[in-house]
Image (cartoon, rainbow, N blue to C red):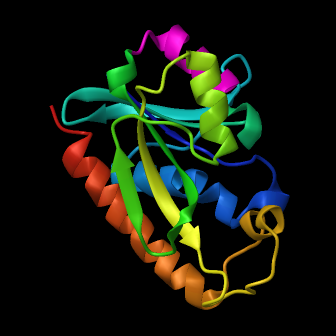
Amino acid sequence: MKLIVGLGNPGSNYLGTRHNAGFEFIKVLKDKIGFGGLIEDKKLKSAITEGLYNNEKIILAMPLTFMNLSGEALSKLKYYYKFEDKDILIVYDDLDLPIGSFRYREKGSAGTHNGMKSIIDFLKTEEIQRLRIGIESRGETSNPNINTSSFVLSKFSDTEREVFDRVVLEVVNYVKNNFLIQ
């Protein structure tokens, strides 16, 4: 059994923003592996869908606690389903990576990402697999002077959206070939 969690912020005003890269990834992945719609589970503070892929139960989740409290939802998911840390993958945006890139790590610090900081605080470990999707484009295709919080909560330009959508498909294939195999 595996758990894949995409980080983001709930609510229509955050749709399509850079900070919701993890949510967008989950939506594409669920479609590519043939899972049904996401259903809100108030007890688990997440929208979830589950199914079998390669004869293994997979749960996809999007925490509905807002980014900075992602650990609260992940903790509930982990203990409710009794996941081991090695069977959890977190997918989220990364301001330190250029748009169009992604990076996988088996463990490590949260860096500057408050969602991962929350997860590490709640789970009391840095031994969580993560896949970071690059969103940085300031000075190339977006305003170089925009502050960080405004930038991550802004929507992609049309050009950036094409690059982002392409890398999300690459990430989906990476996850299918490296995490969703027995």
Quarter occupied by residue 93: bottom right
- Left or right: where 81 falls relative to 84: right
Q: Is residue 99 left or right of residue 116?
A: left
Q: Is residue 141 above or below residue 151?
A: below
The answer to whether one can see residue 88 in this image is yes
Q: Is residue 40 above or below residue 111?
A: above
Judged from this view, the residue extending furthest toward the left is 182
Q: Nearer the viewer, residue 136 or 65?
A: 136
At 76% from the left edge and 70% from the top edge, which residue is drawn? 151
Residue visible at 41% across and 52% down in the picture: 29
- Residue 116 coordinates in the image, percent (x, y): 59, 37
Quadrant assignment for the N terminus: top left
Quick check: 152 left or right of 149? Answer: left
x then y, percent, for residue 107: 39, 34
Question: Where 95 falls versus 7 (above or below)?
Answer: below
In magenta segment, residue 74: yes
Q: Seen in the image, is 114 located left or right of residue 160?
A: right
162 or 133, nearer to the observer:
133
Task: Please state the extent of the stretch shown in magenta in the rendering.
Answer: 71-83
Residue 10, percent across and down?
A: 76, 46
At x 57%, y 26%, the residue is 120
**154 and 137: which one is in front?**
137
The verdict on residue 175 being magenta is no
- What residue appears at the point 67 percent right and 78 percent down from the top-left corner? 156
- Residue 182 image-quadrant placement: top left
Q: Residue 75 location, x and y as percent?
A: 59, 18
